[in-house]
Image (tube, rainbow, N blue to C red):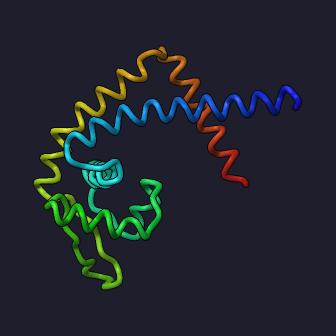
Amino acid sequence: MNNEREKSLKLFIVLSRAYRAVNEKVNKVIQKNGLNPTEFAVLELLYHKGEQPLQQIGGKILLASGSITYVVDKLEEKGYLNRVACPKDRRVTYAKISDDGKKLIEEIFPEHSALIHELMDSLNDDEKDSAIELLKKLGLSVSKY
């Protein structure tokens, strides 16, 4: 196998392991607060971006549309969001974070963001900028396939 191909494989493995390590730590904070990572992602989206059409949530948090209904149902059962019918188009339903959902995110998010900062702190600001630039470049190039 040639050297370039070996480096590509090594990069894939290192990237996968780094993602898994960071994700496992972050998910522990989310789960100890009674949510799964997908539920947290939906609540965080609604908290920071406002109400969203159900049909668009999956694309914004990288989840299959069929799974969104299940997640929204669970969050609605827990009292963390409400479905709101669009007054102009009956085919569209919005998810809106409830007061209880806002309260929960406001409790969880500071710890969540502090942990992410702590986990990323082994890189200095220039290294973070480089990593962001390189990973964006990689992601955009992959979307061509």
Say which quarter of the image contains residue 63. bottom left
User: Above or below — where is 83 with respect to 118?
Assistant: below
x then y, percent, for residue 110: 22, 32
Q: Is residue 58 left or right of residue 28?
A: right
Q: Residue at x 27, y 53 (%)?
A: 43
Q: Is residue 107 left or right of residue 71?
A: left
Say which quarter of the image contains residue 130. top right
- Tell which residue pokes out farthest to the right in this image: 2
Q: Is residue 11 left or right of residue 4?
A: left
Q: Is residue 107 left or right of residue 123?
A: left
User: Above or below — where is 33 with respect to 99?
Assistant: above
- Tell which residue pokes out farthest to the bottom in this image: 90
x then y, percent, for residue 94: 29, 70
x then y, percent, for residue 115: 31, 27
How many numbered badges does the structure rendering display? Answer: 0
Front residue of this view, candidates 74 and 110: 74
Say which quarter of the image contains residue 9. top right
Q: Residue at x 59, y 38 (%)?
A: 136
x then y, percent, for residue 76: 20, 65
User: Above or below — where is 8 with respect to 60?
Assistant: above
Q: Residue at x 43, y 61 (%)?
A: 58
User: Above or below — where is 82 with respect to 60?
Assistant: below
- Tell which residue pokes out farthest to the front in this image: 1
Q: Residue at x 26, y 43 (%)?
A: 31
The quarter in which the N terminus is drawn is top right
The quarter in which the C terminus is drawn is bottom right
